[in-house]
Amino acid sequence: MSNGKKTDSENPSIDARIKLPKKKLIFYLITFVAVFLIFTHQTEFTTVKNLFKESNSEWLFWVVVSQLAAYFLLALNYREVLRIKKTEVPTGELFPLTFIIQFFNQTLPSGGIAGQVFFINYLYKKGFTLAEGIGRAILEMLTLYLAFGVFFLATIALIFREHIIVSHPTIWLFIYAFIFVAILAFGVFFAAQKKSRVRWLEKTVFKLYRFFIDEPSWAKIPFLKNFVDYKKHISPVMNELRATMNIEELRRHAAPFWWATAWQALILVANALTLHFLALALGYRLPLVVSFIAYMLTRFVILTSVVPGALGISEGAMTFALATFGVPLGAAFSITILFRAFTFWLPMPIGWLLYSGMNKQPD
């Protein structure tokens, strides 16, 4: 195990990261976007404020506990994934990073890419190459999809056991969609086991490369300079992709891989408990089973949404899911708005403060 820093001899492939503009420029940019988001959601904040006044403070305390637990569990997931990459980083160091990554994803809607770019640059300081950083991101997604898949199957089992499918046949749409996504995911995973090079991907990258070469003005952009020499990056990245998803490689690191998956599963439980506690805080007794099912259906919509951050879609999906299971529409909307407040809005200033402190530190 490494102590958190790799030597150059351990990174013979490429010594590259996704170079971002200066830290202060990024900080001012995301601060501006965060202020803009807050300014354009004043009506929602007024609604949240009124809901807080109506809520039971004791149950809100447990909401805070469940959300802090979710972030801590995510830090544990990061720790185990990095152990697979033979790097040891303390959980205490990773815990604040979870808020910063969330802050990046909230203020720069990019389907989670913004947070991953930040984390890859953080890992660069630990000795990771670009390819290894991407490999870590793939491992994190792999553990998330595996945990979610198991829990979604459990959700379907609960739906059939409670005969919910009879009264709400629209749930079949979620089941069919899940089967399609699962087949696609398994196809990608087993395709990654092949030793041959992915020719179509290299051809696509080469066409993009020619575009940048033929258009010098693009190549002058600092962020894109890193990607001009595509041959320097594509082979190590594809090798890292195959190595990361290789079954034999995962078997060699079975313990941290399954622990990482377990932490992802518990994150889902923590968020389902948040939904349950919020309903109780508003005086509505939402069965724990319904909380779990409603959250998992909403989470599935978020994971498969093509809209960055699933903004608007996740709120509509959760309100619909709760209303489907008998929650009055007004109560379903209130629960959803508070859930968004605790999972989206309240962590934002925490991430901003933590990133502000990191921004003041020298590279």
Image: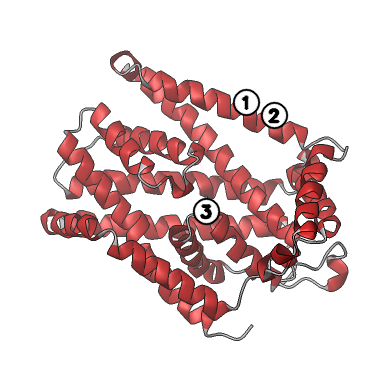
Say what secondary structure mark 1 lies in: helix
Badge 2 vs badge 1, beta-carbon distance below 8 Å: yes
Sequence order check, earlier mark of 1 and 3: 3
Residue matched to label 1: 183
> Which numbered disc flags the more N-terminal residue, 3 or 2?
3
Q: Name the residue under label 3.
A: 110
Q: Which amino acid does label 1 sit on?
A: Ile
Crowd tier of the residue under label 3, counting other residues whose Cα lies within 10 Å: few below 14, some 14–19, many 20 or above = some
Is residue 35 visible in the rendered image? The answer is: yes
Instruction: Please state if 97 lies on the left or on the right of 323 as rendered.
Output: right
Specify whether 355 is left or right of 223: left
Q: Distance between the Cα atoms at labels 2 and 1?
A: 6 Å
Q: Quick one: SS at disc 3? A: loop
> What residue is shown at x 76% (from left), y 33% (from top)?
191
Provide residue 218's location: percent of width, then percent of height.
Answer: 70, 63
The residue sitting at 33% across, 46% down in the picture is 273
